[in-house]
Amino acid sequence: MTSKPASKILAWAIGFSVLAFTATAALAQWQWVEKDGRKIFSDRPPPADIQEKDILKRPAGAPRAAVAATVAAPAAAASPPGLKASAPKLSGKDAELEAKKKKADEEEAAKKKAEEDKAAKTRADNCERAKTGLATLQSGVRMSSVNAKGEREIFDDAKRAAETKRAQEVIDASCK
């Protein structure tokens, strides 16, 4: 019976030690501003080219010169003589994000072109219909239309002139 309480105490002790470890690791954070104005958060000290005034936050008890020296010393010892240790240069751009943005821009341009093509086709159809209607109106053929009551009305000269004017306005607007 004594093994169950002992295992619970052991589990609690392990849990608290893990919590304490993660809390201290979270406190060991550096924060600085790069030359281009971006804020950088890291668990490692900033590069040597970052000025002291640009360091916004450092872990407690970590002087700048001492940390930079300890970081530089292992890197120099690990590299063969004659070769400089260099970290990969970050451009500040994400290639995948740039590709997605480019693809979205291309899709938007294609969509816009499709809409413009559709509008141009509609204008061309309207133009052709208006030209056909104007030719019919100017031919002198007897024309009629159906009114709201369903009765046929023959075009008189005033109605023909009004329809001719309307067809010409459609041609002017659509046939550019």
Image: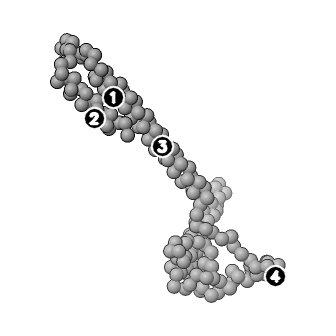
Residue mark closest to the camera, 4 vs 3? 3
Q: Residue 20 carries which label?
A: none
Residue mark closest to the camera, 3 vs 1? 1
Kind of residue at badge 4: Gly
Residue 146, x across and y down, in percent: 23, 15
Q: Which mark is residue 130?
A: 1
Residue mark closest to the camera, 4 vs 1? 1
Front in this rendered view, residue 30 or 54? 54
Circle nearer the N terminus (2, 4) = 4
Marks 4 & 1, CB-CB < 8 Å contact: no
Q: Which mark is residue 113?
A: 3
Name which quarter of the figure residue 166 lies in: top left
Q: Distance between the residues labelled 2 and 4?
A: 82 Å
Circle nearer the N terminus (4, 1) = 4
Q: How crowded is mark 1: few (under 14 residues within 10 Å), some or many (20 or more)?
A: many
Circle nearer the N terminus (4, 3) = 4
Q: Name the residue under label 4.
A: 82
Q: How far apart are marks 4 and 3 (CA)?
A: 57 Å
Q: Mark 2 points at which residue?
A: 169
